Amino acid sequence: MLNASLAPIAADGFTRHRGPVTSVAAIPGRAAAVAVAYDGAVSLFDLDAGTAELLGYHRHLANHVTVSDDGAWAASSSSDYDIHVWDLSERKLALVLRGHSDDVEGFAFVDESTGVSASRDRRIIVWDLVTGAIRRTIEGHEKDVLSVACRDGLIYSSGDDMTLRQWDLATGALIRTWGPFETETDTCAIDMLNGRVVLGCDDGVIRIFDSRDGTALAAIEAHGSGIKKVAVSPVNGDILSCAYDQRIRIWDAATFSPKGDLENHAAKWERSFGWSPDGCTILAGTFDGTVVQWDAASGRILREIGGAPGDQGNACFNEAAAASDGSVALVADDGMVRLIRLTDHEAALVARTAPPGGRRLMNAITRDPGSGRVIAGTHDHKLHVFGAGLESQVEVALGQGPINSIRVAQCAGHEGAMFAACYSGAIVRVSPDGRDVQAHALHDGAVKALRLHPSEALGVSCSADGGLLSWTLDGEILNHFPGHTAIVDDVDISPTGDRIASASRDFTLNVYDVADARLTHSIELGRRSPKSLCFWDADTVIVGDYWGALVKADLRTGRVTRQTIAANGISSLSRSGDGLVASSYDGGVYLVSISDLAVRNVYRAMTQRVGGT
C-alpha cells in the first residue's frame, strides 16, 4: 500500500470519542483495538493500559472499521463517502479510497493488495490497495448495501433490499441470492470453520446457510427486535448477535442453541460488536464514546476504556422541541433530558434530568402545548413523561423498538393523546395518563418521523422502506404518498394543514397535497443526505442535512439556498417565534433567521472535535 502525504492529526487531551463509537476491531497479536465514531474520529485503544490515541478524522461520520489479518492495516468507512486505510505501525493515514457516491457502511480486506467496500449507493467496489484504483464495481442490490464480507474468492453482501447475495470476487458475477426475506437484512458474517454464512434480520431471526451450495441450515428466533450485528467466533464458529431488544447473545456453533447473554451495558451501540482474534473476548463501542470489553465465556464486562471520572457521555443532540418563549427541550446521546433558554440574548441551561431508570439514549422529544408537559422516547422502547420543569411523571413501556418521533394531539376528541413512531413499523397511541396503549402496525419499515395535523384528527408518517402515509388518529390509513425511492427521514405538515413535505435519502424534497396525495413539487437537494425538515410557511421549506447545512427551498421558484451552520448533522428543526431552532450532533443548538439562514445565537453543551477538523 502507498503512503499518502497526510500527516497524523495531533490531539492533545484525546481520551474518548465525542460521539457514539460505531465500530471496534481488535488487532491480532496485540491487546489493542481500532475504533471509529460519529465524531468522524479514528482511534487506537490500548486495552491493557486503558488509553486512547487519536489517529485522525474523516470529514464526516465514521461508520465501520476493520483490521487486516496480519494486524498491519485498518480501514475505516465513512459517511463522507470515503474509506481511509491506516498504517497501524506508523500510526498514520496511508491511503484514501474515493469512488462511492453515498455513505460507505462496510469494508473487508481480501489480501494485502485487495479490499471490498459496501455503500448506501447500492454498489460494492473492489479496490486495488496499492494504487487506490477501482478494480471493479458490482451492482445488483436494489437498495442500500449495509454489510460486506469476503473469503475464499467469494463476496457476501446484505442490506435494505432484504437479500443476502454471494458474488465471485474475480469477475463480479452474482452466484447466488438468498431472499428476499420479509424484513431488512442489515448484517452478515462468514463462518470459515464450518463453511457457513450467517445473516441477521430485522425480524429478530438469525438465518444460517451453507456457503457452498446455498442450503438453508437453520433459522434461530433469536431476538424480539431487529438484529443489528452478527459476528462469528474465529476459534469455534459460535455466533454473536446484538439487537434492538437490548440483548447480546451467543449461540453454539454445533447446535445453534443459546450459550448465554452478555452483561448489559446501557449505552452500548448494537452495530459495533465483534470478537477478538483469539475468541476469548468481545469488544463494542458505546454512545458515551468509550470501548467495552467482555469475557466471552462468562459474559461479564471486563473493562470500559475511554473518558475520565465524572464523564456523563456525549451531548450529541438528537431532537429539539422549541416554544415561542425561547424555551427548548432537548434529548441527546448522553441519555439526559435538558431544558434550555435560547433567544437572541440568552443561551443557558435551565434544567437537566435523566429518566428514573438512569441515563438512556433518547432520539425523540416533544412538548404538549396544552399541559406544558415534556415527552421523551428512549432507545429501550420506553416513553417518559415529565412536567414542565422536567419532574418525572409517567413511564410507559411500548415494546415496539427504539422510539424515533413523538407528537401530542390537540384536536377535539383527542386532546393530550401521545403518538410515538417506533422502529417496529408501528405508530403507538398512548392516553394522556399512560394507561391505554394502542399499537397500529402501519409501516413495513422503521418509522422515522410523524406529525399531527394542526386541527384535524389526522397524522402523517414516514419510514425506512420509503413509505409516506396519512392516517386517522384511530390508526386507519387514509393515503399513500408515492414518489420516494429510498429512506424517508422526515416529514412535516404546512402551517395551514393542506400540504406535507418530506425529505428522503434519494436526495429529494417532495411536497404533496394532503387531501388527495398529489405530488406538487419534487426538488433536488444535491448529493448530501437530508435528515430533518420544517414546513415553515406556504412558500418555504427548510431541510437540515447530515453535513451540518440548512437548505431553504422556495416553492414558488424552486430556488434552493444552502448555508452550513454546524460541524455535524442537523438532527431536527423546530419553530421558536420568528426563528428556527436547529439541533446538531455536534453538541450545539442553533437559533437561525429564516430570511438568510444566519445563526443568531448558539447553545453549546459539547465541542466535538478536540484535535482538528
Image (spheres, grey):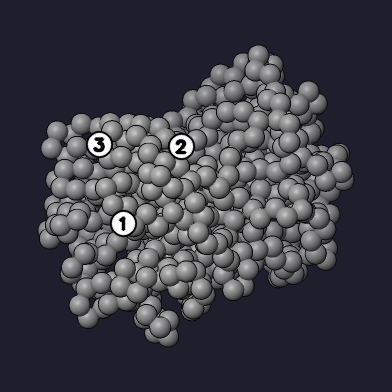
Mark 1 and mark 2 lie on one chain; the one further toward the N terminus is 1
Q: Position of residue 208 (x, y in %)?
A: 61, 58
Please identify the residue farthest to the top as the structure is shown.
5
- The amino acid marked with disc number 1 is Ser
How many angstroms separate mark 1 from mark 2 (CA)? 23 Å
Residue 103 pos. (x, y %): 48, 37
Q: Which residue is mark 3?
A: 595
Q: Is residue 562 left or right of residue 135?
A: left
Disc number for residue 324: 1
Question: In the image shown, does 146 or 153 lie closer to the viewer?
Answer: 146
The residue at the point 65 percent across, 63 percent down is 266
Q: Secondary structure at mark 1?
A: loop
Judged left or right of residue 384, residue 274 is right
Rendered location of residue 118, percent (x, y):
53, 38
Question: Which one is in front, 496 or 381?
Answer: 496
User: Which residue is the extreme one toward the bottom?
Assistant: 435
Residue at the disc numbered 2: 566
Quick one: SS at disc 2? loop
Q: What's the CA distance linking mark 3 and mark 1?
A: 18 Å
The N terminus: image quadrant: top right
Residue 250 visible in the current orientation: yes
- Identify which amino acid the numbered label 2 is placed on: Ala
Q: Work out whether residue 155 or residue 486 is closer to the camera in this orientation and state it.
A: 486
Q: Residue at (46%, 37%) from the top-left corner?
A: 566
Q: Secondary structure at mark 3?
A: loop
Q: Which quarter of the picture shows residue 547?
A: top left
Circle 2: is it few (<14), some (14-19), or many (20+) Cα within 10 Å? Answer: many
Q: What amino acid is at disc 3?
A: Ser
Residue 198: % across, % down: 62, 54
| Residue neighbourhood size for the residue with mark 3, other residues' Cα within 10 Å, grouped as few (<14), some (14–19), many (≥20) | few
Q: Residue at x 66, y 43 (%)?
A: 17
Mark 1, mark 2: which one is toward the viewer? 1
